[in-house]
Image: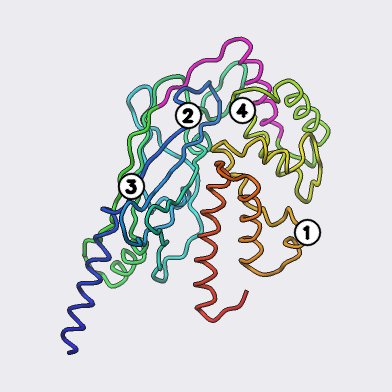
Amino acid sequence: MKRVIFFLSIAISTYSQTYNPNLLSCTLSVEKDTFLLDEPIYVEFKETNIGQTDVMTNRFFFDIKESYYATLIGPDGKEIKRGGGHGDRPYDRPEEGYLLKPDESQYYVIYLNNYYGISKTRPKEGKGKYLPIGFYQYQITHYTNANYMYEKLQSEYHKQNITIDKMPVVSNELTFYIVGPNAEQDKERLAYLQCRKTHSWQTNKEEIIRLYREYFTNYKNSPLFYKYVLMLGLDILLSPPANTQIYYTKEEILNKVKNSYSSFEFSEGCNKMYDDLKNDDRRFTPKIEGYKRIANKYPDTQISKYLLMKVSENEQFKKKWLKSGKTE
């Protein structure tokens, strides 16, 4: 009987290590295929369970480089190396993975400009990283084995030379263009860059307020994406320690960004918008409730989609947390 159980456990383990990729679909998308120079490029990563059974995958985070491989090919046909650091993730214990039910998806939105770019001095803009004008190709291979890095480190610790199945899922090849702005568009671009150059709130408070107010007075109805990065700046300034409303309230910002991929960056901290949740010290429940309230307020929107994923994510975290004997 023990031998039967032993072989059964091997079969289950082997199956769990190989079935995931065939039941997952990974897609990258952008909201348009042509961007202006310096315009924010938001890439949506979407991984969907296309099978009929539950799938355990690796929760995708762009800052955790070990869990994927990405390539951005620039106008000259060469790969542009990405910058940015690693996330703070422990690998000293096995992961339970991230559960996706049939037809359920996990999302992540990558603000591409933040991670890729060349450093070059430009006459109007000065120094800074940017993606030059031209045609781009982008692709991601997600390593869906949540235990890949743990298994790798364990094998190295025990000095074992073994092959570990990363269970890779390859996305589509995303393509887009970056083009030069016309004279009117360039005015907005330079106004946007000027806002972004002034960083320190403590030493440049009045200048930041002036630049932001000037930008939104002139370009609040612009169809370009520059405004989304600046709205995130406004959202941050609405929070402590600044507590300063420059142009929009938090609710007005959410209403402006709700159907943009940029709304992914605004989806954190929803519990802080409600006094009853803001003062709730529990670890997961106030977050979950805050996400649900905003998702219900903006149904069938991009931000609702991202928040409902966060509800599922935090409910899974909560279940594991309580299962370990801890309390909220």
Determine which residue is flagged by label 2. 118
Q: Earlier in the sequence, mark 2 or mark 3?
A: 3
N-terminal of the pair, mark 1 or mark 3, is 3
Q: Which residue is mark 4?
A: 226
Q: Which residue is pictured at 29% across the width and 54% down the height?
A: 23
Please name the residue that numbered disc 1 is placed on: 275
Q: Toward the viewer: 15 or 53? A: 53
Figure check: 173 above or below 150: above
Location of residue 152 in the rendering, given as x and y in whole percent from the top left corner: 31, 63
Residue drawn where x is 44% and y is 39% of the image: 82
Q: Is residue 170 left or right of residue 267?
A: left
Q: Earlier in the sequence, mark 1 or mark 4?
A: 4
Q: Mark 2: which amino acid?
A: Ile
Q: Which residues are magenta?
A: 176-198
Residue 76 x %, y %: 35, 22
Counting other residues with Cα less than 10 Å from the Cα at mark 4, is it few (<14), some (14-19), or many (20 or more)?
A: many
